[in-house]
Image (spheres, rainbow, N blue to C red):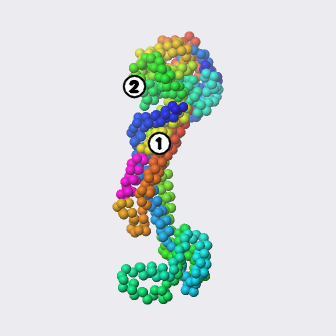
Amino acid sequence: MINRIWRPIKEGFLGVFRHGAMSVSAAVAVTLTLIIISLFMMFTMNVSQFTQGIEQSVQISAIVGYDHETAQEEDRISLAIQGIEGVDTVTYSSKADEFQYYLNSFSDEKTREAFKPFEGDNNPMHDAFYVTVKDGTALESVASQIAAIDGIDTVNFGGSSAITLISMLRSIRYGGGALALALSLLAIFLIQNTIKLTIMARADEIAIMRNVGARNGFIRAPFLVEGIIIGALGAVIPIILTWYGYTSAYNLTGGYLVSQMFKLIPPAQFLKNACWTILLIGVVVGLIGSFLSVTKYLRWKR
Amino acid sequence: MIECSHVYKKYKNGVNALYDINFKVEQGEFVYIIGPTGSGKSTLIKLLDGEEIATKGKVSVVGIDVGKLSHSKVPVYRRNIGVVFQDFKLLPSKTVFENIAYALEVINLPKSLIRRRVRSVMNLVGLDEKGNSFPRELSGGQQQRVAVARAIANRPKVLIADEPTGNLDPSMSDEVMNLLDKINREYGTTILMVTHDLTIVNKHRKRTVVLEHGHIVADLKEGGYVQHDQ
């Protein structure tokens, strides 16, 4: 029983060494593919992070009319906003808060002084609600629903430019994801072909094994182990590149691209999983490639 | 042990290889199948070891209907027969010892028994010293002896040899023939040997079945080959 588990593992390792050149060429194919997949993975995950960040930061400001400023009315409005589908959080900001916020936007004391007379009862500001939405695409419809509530004077959100940005990032994300998927499939096909070539050279070997009475499973097992080893070996360089490459890219850019809006995912949070994923893809691709190839050559002769 | 009744073989490409082949080999017999190139000898071997299926008729070896076996059962059937090929068919990336041991590993024998068996057959074929050599490091005669050792390692009841001396010079051929003789006598293994080497057939006389153009044209119990009219 133990022999049944150890034999294929031992034979698999031996196979990798005894067919060194072919193992290396197959592992190189895996390496190149995984590097491409890794690049796409880092790209799409970051774009996805941008989109989420922007979606969350975009908010709707709903300004309450002067004649609806009683606590009772504002409670009603708050409840009405919370009742709208797609609304995530609702934050109340009084006219005093608003004025303070406005004042703080000036850096010099003089200007602030100039606005002093408007404090208190003369405050020209409105009470306001700040609304965030769960899904960026719902921004416009939520905004129009808020505008329809009795007592709301005006509604502001980033407008069509915010929506355009969100939908643009979205299509980049989906497009990138689709491209990564297509590339991965292409890569799997390439790898399978390379492995097939390495096994084709051993088609005779497989036929001989059947000649001396080896069952198909007995023949296949060591080849599967070989595929796993080749896949894992092929993942080594991509993992190192991803780890150091992403860390240094992050440090070089200071953690964001162009503006603070495009924050990169911090390496610590992302790299461990990314590297495991690369290893897993390598191993699975090696395994599948080997399986398909051996099966083909098992059928070659009766 | 081996029985062919009304066996026909026509390949997919339309080539007719065998017509109405009937013969029977009893346990412990040593039989030559001879005939010129293209007479159907190799096809007959392929039918016997399960690589090809007869178009018509029944091929039965050690009581198993070979043509009825599924693809996955063919190797299991082959554990009952040993086959020696003209081109040896040794695994190039395995040593002599491992090549012979492989035929025993596939039937899940315990390691210690495998080691003992391999040593004993290596001794029988006179290659005690070559266990760690790879096939490419051996001469043709030595490689063929390894192949014989592998074929008999799991003590099959039937040994089929396809031109085992085809690639060897006369002195090495004699060596292999003496070995097969010994196996036939000592183990009582039924041996069916395909050859076109008339020197051997006439020197080591055995029952001889003559194939020509896919027909059995003679079955000489006493052996020795009488040249046909050309």
Residue A264, above or below B95: below
| Residue in front for this viewpoint, B128 or B77 | B128
| Residue in front for this viewpoint, A51 or B131 | A51
| Residue in front for this viewpoint, A227 or A255 | A255
The residue at 49%/34% (across/down) is: A6
**Quarter the N terminus of chain A occupies:** top right
Can I make out residue B176 in this image? no
Q: Position of residue B97 (x, y in %)?
A: 44, 24
| Residue in front for this viewpoint, A79 or B9 | A79
Return the residue at label 2.
B133
Residue furthest out toward the front: A120
Q: Position of residue A152 (x, y in %)?
A: 57, 81
Query: Predominant secondary structure in magenta?
Result: helix
The residue at 41%/52% (across/down) is: A35
| Magenta-drawn stretch contains A108 | no
- Magenta range is A234-249
Q: Position of residue A288 (x, y in %)?
A: 51, 44
Residue A20, above or below A99: above
Q: Disc 1 is attached to a residue of which chain? A: A
- Could you say which disc has been placed on residue B225 in the image? none
Can I make out residue A294 in this image? yes
Mark 2 crowd level (few <14, some 14–19, many ≥20, 10 Å Cα): some
Return the residue at label 1.
A228
